[in-house]
Image (cartoon, helix red, strand yellow):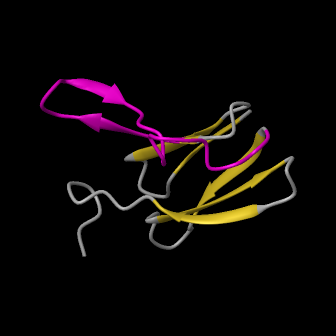
Amino acid sequence: MDASWNITGEKFSVATSSGNVYIGFYNKENNFWVAPALDEERSIHKASVVCARFDPLSGRVIASCSLDGRVLISSCYLKELDKI
């Protein structure tokens, strides 16, 4: 239901009606874009996610809000991309 890029343009987020948020990035090994879920085992929200935004300073944290009335702050740190 929503999509956005982080500040560096290396990652993007996709908020879905299934209640999960996916973080996409370019996988150099496969020469393809991949987008794994924040939680592979279950949805992080109990209803549709309507907004997901990266932290504007680092892009290592994402906030998501849902129709279940919750706002969640989750880590989306990727060792390959988010160098200190």
Residue 29 position within the rendered picture, expressed as x and y whole percent measured from the top left: 12, 31
**Image quadrant where residue 77 sits:** bottom left
Q: Residue at x 68, y 31 (%)?
A: 18
Whether residue 28 sits left or right of residue 63 in the image: it is left
Q: Which residue shows up at 37% across the image and 47% down it?
A: 10
Seen in the picture, residue 75 relative to 28 is either above or below; the reply is: below
Q: Quadrant of residue 65?
A: bottom right
Q: Main secondary structure of the magenta part?
A: loop
Position of 7 relative to 1 (above/below): below
The part of the chain drawn in magenta is 22-47
| Left or right of 47 on screen, residue 23 | left
What quarter of the picture does the C terminus occupy?
Answer: bottom left
Name of the residue lying farthest toward the front: 41
Task: State yes or no: residue 23 in magenta.
Answer: yes
Judge whether residue 18 is colored magenta. no
> Which percent across, then down, holds residue 57?
50, 73
Whether residue 64 sits left or right of residue 67 in the image: it is left
| Quarter of image, res 24 | top left
Image quarter where the N terminus lies is: top right
Q: Is residue 42 above or below residue 30?
A: below
Q: Is residue 72 above or below residue 27?
A: below
